[in-house]
Image (tube, rainbow, N blue to C red):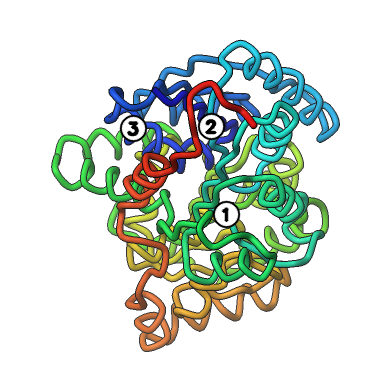
Amino acid sequence: MKKILLVFGTRPEAIKMAPVVKEFQQHRNMFDVKVCVTAQHREMLDQVLHFFEIKPDFDLNVMHPNQDLFDVTSKVLLGIRDVLKTYSPDLVLVHGDTTTSMVAALAAFYLNIKVAHVEAGLRTYNLKSPWPEEMNRQFTDRISDYYFAPTELSKNNLLKEHVEENKISITGNTVIDALMFVVDKINESEQTQIEIEKVLTSAGYNVSDRPYILVTGHRRENFGKGFLSICQAIKEMSFLYPHIDIVYPVHLNPNVRNPVYEILKDVSNVFLIDPLDYLPFVYLMKQSTLILTDSGGVQEEAPSLGKPVLVMRDTTERPEAVSAGTVKLVGTDKSKIVAEVKRLLDDPEAYRAMSQANNPYGDGNASKRIVEFVLNQNEIKPGIHS
């Protein structure tokens, strides 16, 4: 029986890895599956674990106030070392571009344990954007053994970097698996929708017939001047469109919360609420008019819901959605953000073109493809780590 360890630490990772955990657990006769969380995001991670009914076998609980990347990196590295020596897995699965993923892959590499990278091959080729995520992702790919690429483009990136083709599987993105699960849960029950709306009301926004723009933002490269510009753009939009609400679940990081609340707290049609559980957040996406974000996951999810996405970044490691027309980069320049929002709100044809484009990120079966690939790798043998 192959021993599989899945490692993740942030809310986005948890959302994207939950379907993979669930799929591996469907094959208990073939796999001994364990989950390790670093809790790089504590509260937001726990929300997702609770929703997907995942109980970690190992919890490093590395999150502490005012820590920096040096603290997170060292804590995760030492904590994962002990987990790997205790459990001795045959394969470690990590996800995406977080410090947790990069360090967990490094720890496994140090112990000659094979590493599989979920959501491999995404690139901007600019180590400063997104920062430090681009470096994390490239580093993780460099020391991985198997690669689950969400798209043909991400596979081609890996091939250009001399990764062997038989080590790569194009799976689609697991976030679509998670999204479809949640949308089905919402659609199948009117009572669920009522309960979600109660949660949103308690959080500070009462969903009504008024249209609204959903905003998310948390990227480190936008801290400081970038977030000030984003907030000024939101404020201007609120005055231009007083009949439209702007709903912003604000990340807990003080580098985000401080400028957001300083500039927007008294604007009547801007609703600043705390981060949401995944279920109500998907509901907010589903009911929104359009989405402003710097999140990678939202770039992948929103097109499946028919929502135009304006990305408040200068680069994206997800250019497929830009090519498909579902996503547009607007950076953090105030005038550009406002101009693009106006274009979508004032031009029905522009809105229709973005909302009806196809999502290039998958069909909801990525997790199945990942498990099938691992099942077919004869070189992953119990007890052999070299």
Residue that appears at 62% across and 63% down = 158
The image's mark for residue 348 is none
* Residue that badge 2 annotates: 91
Residue 320, given in percent of the width and then of the height, sits at 51, 73
Q: Give the residue at the far top of this rendering.
A: 86
Location of the C terminus by quadrant is top right
Residue 91, given in percent of the width and then of the height, sits at 53, 32
Tell me how far mark 2 sits from mark 3, CA to CA: 17 Å
Identify the image quadrant of residue 252: top right
Q: Amino acid at mark 3?
A: Lys
Residue 35, given in percent of the width and then of the height, sits at 49, 23
Location of the N terminus by quadrant is top left
Q: Which comes before the other along the chain, label 1 or label 3?
A: 3
Tell me how far mark 1 sits from mark 2, CA to CA: 16 Å
Residue 350, given in percent of the width and then of the height, sits at 42, 86
Identify which residue, 263 or 139, lies in the foreground: 139
Mark 2 vs mark 3, foreground winner is 2
Q: Amino acid at mark 2?
A: Leu
* Residue that badge 1 annotates: 120
Task: Give above or below for 75 relative to 318.
Answer: above
Q: Which comes before the other along the chain, label 1 or label 2?
A: 2
* Residue that badge 3 annotates: 22
Q: Residues within 10 Å of mark 1 (few under 14, many from 20)?
A: many
Q: Amino acid at mark 1?
A: Ala
Determine whether the residue tagged by mark 2 lies in a helix, strand or loop: strand
Task: Give above or below for 107 relative to 305.
Answer: above
Residue that appears at 55% across and 65% down = 154
Identify which residue, 59 or 159, lies in the foreground: 159
Residue that appears at 50% across and 39% down = 379
Tell me how far mark 1 sits from mark 3, CA to CA: 20 Å
Q: Is residue 96 visible?
A: yes
Determine whether the residue tagged by mark 3 lies in a helix, strand or loop: helix
